[in-house]
Image (tube, helix red, strand yellow):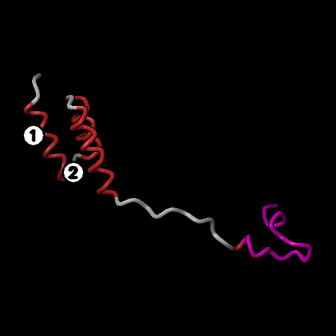
Amino acid sequence: MASKANADDSGKPSAKAGRAPSMPMARDPSAAVAEEFEAARRAGTREAFELFIARHGDDPLAEQARAELKRLPR
């Protein structure tokens, strides 16, 4: 059914149908993780650092988050 919607009178797909929609470039995953770490630092709470560690425990920034946790009062 979708092919009929994109077909002209001859039954062939139109030129627009073959073009992929323009997509933005994918973000660098490490940049997104760094932004999350900075957000946790700005929040400065145990919960923020624990969430970061839970989501990114294998990332090198997780060690910094663990160090920040140790500095916070319980």
Residue 68, percent from left and from top: 12, 37
Residue at x-position 29% and y-position 57%: 30
State yes or no: residue 3 in magenta. yes
User: Disc count in the image?
Assistant: 2
Task: Tell me the mark number nearer the camera, choosing from 1 and 2.
Answer: 1
For this view, does 17 lie left or right of residue 7?
A: left
**What kind of element bears circle 2?**
loop
Instruction: Choose between 11 and 15: the one closer to the eye.
Output: 15
Residue, disc 1: 67
In the orientation shown, which residue stands out farthest toward the left?
71
Query: Is residue 13 positioned above or below 73 on the image?
Result: below
- Identity of the residue furthest to the right in this view: 9
Answer with left or right where residue 30 lies relative to residue 26.
Answer: left
Q: What is the secondary structure assignment of the residue under circle 1?
A: helix
Q: Residue at x 40, y 59 (%)?
A: 27
Q: Give the quarter of the image for residue 51.
A: top left
Tell me what residue is drawn at x 43 percent, y 61 percent. 26
Structural distance between the alpha carbons of marks 1 and 2: 15 Å
For disc 2, the marked residue is: 58
What amino acid is labelled 2 in the image? Asp
Quarter of the image where the C terminus is located:
top left
Q: Which residues are magenta?
A: 1-17
Position of 63 compared to 25: left or right? left
Mark 2 is surrounded, within 10 Å at the Cα level, by few (under 14), some (14 to 19) or many (20 or more) other residues, namely few
Residues under numbered marks 1 and 2 in contact, where contact means CB atoms less than 8 Å apart:
no
Task: Count residues near mark 1 (Cα–Cα under 10 Å), then give few for <14, some for 14-19, many for 20+.
Answer: few
1 or 2: tag closer to the N-terminus = 2
Q: Amino acid at mark 1?
A: Ala
